[in-house]
Image: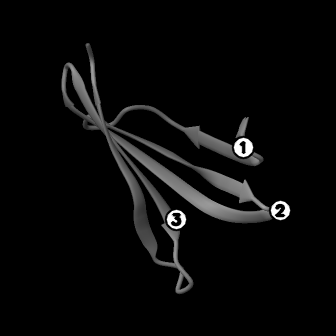
Amino acid sequence: MVVGNGNSYNMTASDWKDKKLVWEGTLVRMEKSTPLRQEMIQNSQNKFTATYFISDYAGKCKPIVNEICDRI
């Protein structure tokens, strides 16, 4: 569990598969729990893309944050 700014995250991942690592769990914000998913994709040896998804009111996953991480 990671806690910051009053929010908490509880997520687990199995292992890398086809250069993708998928984390799934929950985000607790203002005492409300929301399903959360993060997909990390290895674009190259020195670059990763991380995208976070939450469910909308219809239960469909929508991307909310997209980050690019470069090794320096």
The picture places residue 27, in percent across and down from the top left corner, at 67, 54
Q: Which residue is mark 2?
A: 31
- The local secondary structure at tag 3 comes to strand
**From mark 1 to mark 3, how far is it between C-alphas?**
19 Å
- Tell me which amino acid carries mark 2: Glu
Q: Is residue 44 above or below residue 7?
A: above
Of all residues shown, which one is farthest toward the right?
A: 31
Q: Quadrant of residue 47?
A: top left
Q: Earlier in the sequence, mark 1 or mark 3?
A: 1
Q: Is residue 5 above or below residue 32?
A: above
The picture places residue 6, in percent across and down from the top left corner, at 77, 47
Give whichever of 65, 22 is nearer the camera: 65
Residue for point 62% across, 62% down = 35
Q: Earlier in the sequence, mark 2 or mark 1?
A: 1
- The local secondary structure at tag 1 comes to loop
Asked if disc 1 and disc 3 are in contact, CB closer than 8 Å, the reply is: no
Figure quadrant of the N terminus:
top right
The picture places residue 39, in percent across and down from the top left corner, at 39, 46
Is residue 19 visible in the rendered image? The answer is yes
Q: Which residue is mark 1?
A: 5
- Tell me which amino acid carries mark 1: Asn
Residue for point 46% across, 48% down = 38
